[in-house]
Image (cartoon, rainbow, N blue to C red):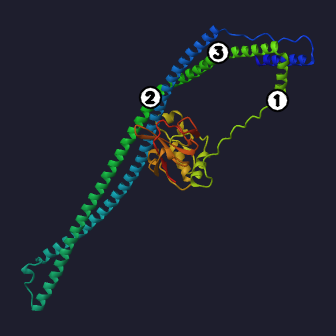
């Protein structure tokens, strides 16, 4: 029976009571009985509902497994993208080191050239000394240099002169040797520094290529699951409709039986105790309606206004709805994303202004003067590690796959977090996800 039918039934019963109270003859009968499904129909409906419920349960289990696979796949994509993020940071660091080493090498080469010039100058002095000695027909320390002295004073003067010239020669020879040694040392240091910087840059480039390849592989795997994901979502909606229909069918039969029993009780009361029915109906009509209890209000966020953690939380919450952009975000706010050669490019992140997961953390913590690197793996080591069951508002939460951290979010209290989840999404508040979560949080403040 519909709600309108039950309203007519209540009106008729009230009229019956009024006639009985006023003594008007000819009591009006209750309306015809509602449908009364048989026990066989009820049993058949319950059996059908049970079968459907079992089927829905199996399908729900399959959906849960498929969704778990999709979550794992998404985690792998995030891990690959974060590996690429790390490789990009390491590559920039290595390139800066290589540039510095090259500058040092250039400076060393300039100093070596100067040392070479000094060598040439000393060699010129020696050449002049040798030429002068040849023209005089004598050499330092030879007996012929003393022949021809006319007096002991002249002999002494010649000895002093030759000693001075010999000393200059030795000084020139020592200076040339020092310059040659210094040049060799500087050349050696420059070559070593340049070689080390070149090796580091080559390693960083190789890591970047490997990360890009992993990202591309994850992208291809995810692309292969897109159609399956859509099909699963459609199937899930269909299963939910089937479950609702099965529950409605069972509930409908049981409601019909319940309503018939209610009607039968009303009919018996009408036939047996019209007077008592009138009194009961009158009491029911005059009874005050029960006050509905107000639903409890939502608890306020677990926060203490004015503390540093709340500043970080408020700063992150101020960006709700900002698009996800891989590589986007810095201490000043959202920035344009960068190309990754895969997932992010598919969603056009390079043309969006927004945040990725680690970029949102950079912006949030910049509000209290904390500087974080643009890679979630490094951010996890930026503070004190605290067990997950002791997490507090302002702590950073991390997720990993195969030991590699690939996502970060900010805990805001009451089991909620704020995050920049993935390409195609926006900054949002969500319940804390415990699948794949790292069992420690990072407390920076």
134 displayed left or right of 229: left
Q: CA distance from mark 3 to mark 2?
A: 42 Å
Q: Position of residue 41 (x, y in %)?
A: 64, 9
Q: Secondary structure at mark 3?
A: helix
220 displayed left or right of 367: left
Using a 10 Å C-alpha cutoff, classify the residue at mark 3 as few (fewer than 14 neighbours), some (14 to 19) or many (20 or more): some
Q: CA distance from mark 2 to mark 1?
A: 67 Å
Q: CA distance from mark 1 to mark 3?
A: 35 Å
Q: Position of residue 223 (x, y in %)?
A: 48, 28
- Residue depicted at 41% across the width and 47% down the height: 90
Residue that numbered label 3 is attached to: 249
Q: Are marks 2 and 1 in contact (CB under 8 Å)?
A: no
Residue 138, quarter of picture: bottom left
- Residue depicted at 57% across the width and 16% down the height: 50
**Eyeballing the image, is 5 above or below 346?**
above
Residue that numbered label 1 is attached to: 287
- Which of 184 and 201 lies nearest the eye of the viewer? 201
Q: Secondary structure at mark 2?
A: helix
Q: Position of residue 206 (x, y in %)?
A: 36, 41
């Amino acid at each position: 029976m519909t709600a309108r039918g039950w309203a007519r039934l209540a009106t008729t019963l009230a009229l019956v009571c009024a006639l009985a109270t006023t003594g008007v003859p000819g009591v009006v009968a209750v309306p015809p009985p509602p449908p009364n499904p048989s026990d066989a129909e009820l049993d058949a409906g319950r059996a059908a509902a049970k079968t459907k419920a079992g089927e829905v349960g199996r399908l729900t289990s399959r959906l849960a497994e498929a969704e778990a696979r999709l979550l794992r796949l998404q985690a792998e994509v995030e891990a690959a993208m974060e590996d690429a993020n790390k490789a990009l940071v390491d590559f920039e660091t290595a390139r800066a080191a290589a540039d510095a080493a090259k500058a040092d090498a250039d400076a060393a080469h300039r100093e070596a050239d100067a040392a070479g010039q000094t060598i040439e100058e000393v060699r010129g002095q020696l050449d002049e000394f040798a030429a002068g000695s040849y023209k005089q027909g004598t050499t330092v320390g030879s007996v012929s240099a003393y022949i021809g002295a006319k007096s002991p004073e002249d002999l002494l003067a010649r000895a002093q002169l030759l000693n001075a010239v010999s000393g200059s020669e030795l000084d020139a020879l020592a200076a040339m040797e020092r310059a040659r040694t210094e040049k060799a040392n500087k050349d050696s240091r420059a070559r070593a520094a340049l070689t080390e910087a070149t090796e580091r840059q080559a390693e960083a480039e190789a890591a970047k290529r490997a990360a890009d390849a992993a990202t591309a592989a994850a992208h291809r795997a995810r692309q292969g699951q897109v159609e399956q994901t859509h099909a699963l979502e459609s199937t899930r909606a269909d299963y939910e409709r089937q479950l609702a229909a099965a529950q409605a069918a069972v509930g409908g039969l049981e409601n019909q039986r319940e309503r018939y029993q209610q009607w039968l009780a009303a009919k018996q009361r009408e036939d047996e105790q019209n007077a008592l029915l009138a009194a009961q109906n009158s009491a029911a009509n005059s009874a005050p309606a029960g006050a509905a209890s107000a639903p409890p209000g939502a608890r306020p966020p677990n926060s203490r206004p004015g503390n540093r953690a709340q500043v970080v939380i408020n700063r992150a919450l101020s960006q709700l709805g900002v698009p996800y952009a891989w590589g986007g975000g810095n201490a000043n706010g959202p920035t344009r994303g960068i190309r990754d050669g895969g997932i992010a490019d598919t969603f056009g992140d390079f043309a969006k202004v927004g945040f990725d997961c680690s970029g949102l953390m950079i912006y949030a913590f910049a509000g209290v003067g904390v500087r974080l690197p643009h890679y979630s793996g490094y951010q996890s080591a930026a503070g004190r590690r605290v067990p997950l069951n002791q997490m507090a508002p302002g702590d950073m939460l991390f997720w990993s796959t195969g030991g590699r951290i690939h996502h970060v979010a900010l805990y805001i209290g009451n089991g909620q977090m704020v995050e920049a989840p993935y390409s195609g999404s926006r900054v949002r508040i969500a319940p804390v996800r415990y699948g794949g979560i790292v069992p420690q949080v990072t407390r920076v403040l």
